[in-house]
Image (tube, rainbow, N blue to C red):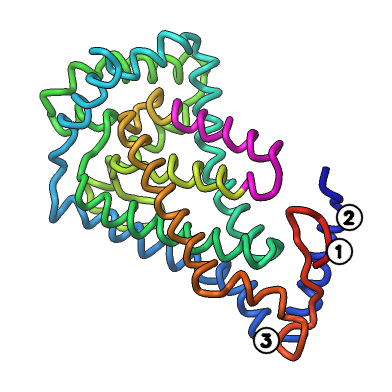
Amino acid sequence: MRDYRTAVDQVIDQWRAALLNPYLFAARVAPIIMMPFFFASFSVLKMLMPRYVPFWLDEPFARMDQFLFFGYHPWQLTHAVFTSPESTVTLDLFYSVWVILLSVAIAGFALFAPRQERARFFLSFGGAWFFLGFIGAWLGSSAGPCFLANLNSPLAPEFAGLMERLHAASNSMDTVAQAVEWQEMLWSGYENQTYRFGMGISAMPSLHNAIAVLYVFLAFRFGKLIGWVATAYAVIIFIGSIHLGWHYAVDGIFSAIGMWGIWKLANWWCVASGYDAAIPREGSALDSTVSMDFRKGSIS
């Protein structure tokens, strides 16, 4: 088991070095300052995409799901397993926590993570939003099951049962599920062309699933226990994305594969560029910190 006191000592050493070096200090705080602008810009792009590339791939993705799940739509299977309103609202809660975890992860990796893990996180994170969230969404333009009725899609009757169950679960709990609330808000924004933070409709690929998978890759670099916890959460996000009507199963599958490729590319760059090898030699004029192996909890 890792010595967590060593990890705390490392964080203290990193911040001592950062306070003495403007470059290292900027590297710690810049991601937090930049993220609001990044997400605001992404929201505008996401709102604009359907104006240029209308939603046209919902039916192929739905049919792919049926092929993979032996003729069933995946939502039929999740609602056969998670039948109670309480289970639906619980999945909705886990799915909503993703937004909070996103902020925690950005701040945590920016301020406290070892430099090797921080580099991998932000390279992979940026790659996910660009290659999956922008290019992937442009090429795979689709709205998702929850918006099919609004679009008067011929597929809507096949997903009517899903939306009825989702609304019934929300109403029976004497509260509006956040998925229902957000779906109504996003559709209103789409109709009214409201350009603001967090708006935009895009099903393929699923960034919820992609970022949850990124957490898994990073978590295993810190330990097996936290890695398996992250894996369990990624599975819940995948199930929730289907159960709550946001995505087709192939959205999550494609996202996981794409995130794996981006992660491998980021990892390769950190090694091939010499970034990883340079970090142990930081203890001079550039950086007075003592380099430690965070994962093993030993000083190198």
Q: Mark 3, residues whose alpha carbon is within 10 Å: few (<14), some, or many (≥20)?
A: few
Q: Which residue is mark 2?
A: 5
Q: Is residue 19 visible in the rendered structure shown here?
A: no
Q: Mark 1, residues whose alpha carbon is within 10 Å: few (<14), some, or many (≥20)?
A: few
Q: Which residue is mark 1?
A: 9
The quadrant the C terminus occupies is bottom right
Q: Give the amino acid at mark 2.
A: Arg
Q: Nearer the viewer, mark 3 or mark 1?
A: 1
Q: Give the amino acid at mark 3.
A: Pro
Q: Is residue 83 left or right of residue 258?
A: right
Q: Secondary structure at mark 1?
A: helix
76 falls in the magenta region = no
Q: Secondary structure at mark 3?
A: helix
The magenta segment: 219-239
Q: Is residue 82 visible in the rendered structure shown here?
A: yes
Residue 202 at what x, y percent from top left? 28, 44
Q: Which residue is mark 3?
A: 22
Q: Residue at x 24, y 19 (%)?
A: 66
The reply to whether discs 3 and 1 touch (Cβ–Cβ < 8 Å) is no
Report the predominant secondary structure element of the magenta stretch: helix
In the rendered view, tell whether residue 44 sits above or below residue 58: below
Q: Give the amino acid at mark 1.
A: Asp
Dot 3 or dot 1: first in sequence order is: 1
Q: Residue at x 73, y 53 (%)?
A: 295
Q: Secondary structure at mark 2?
A: helix
The reply to whether discs 1 and 2 touch (Cβ–Cβ < 8 Å) is yes
The quadrant the N terminus occupies is top right
225 falls in the magenta region = yes
Q: Is residue 112 left or right of residue 150?
A: right
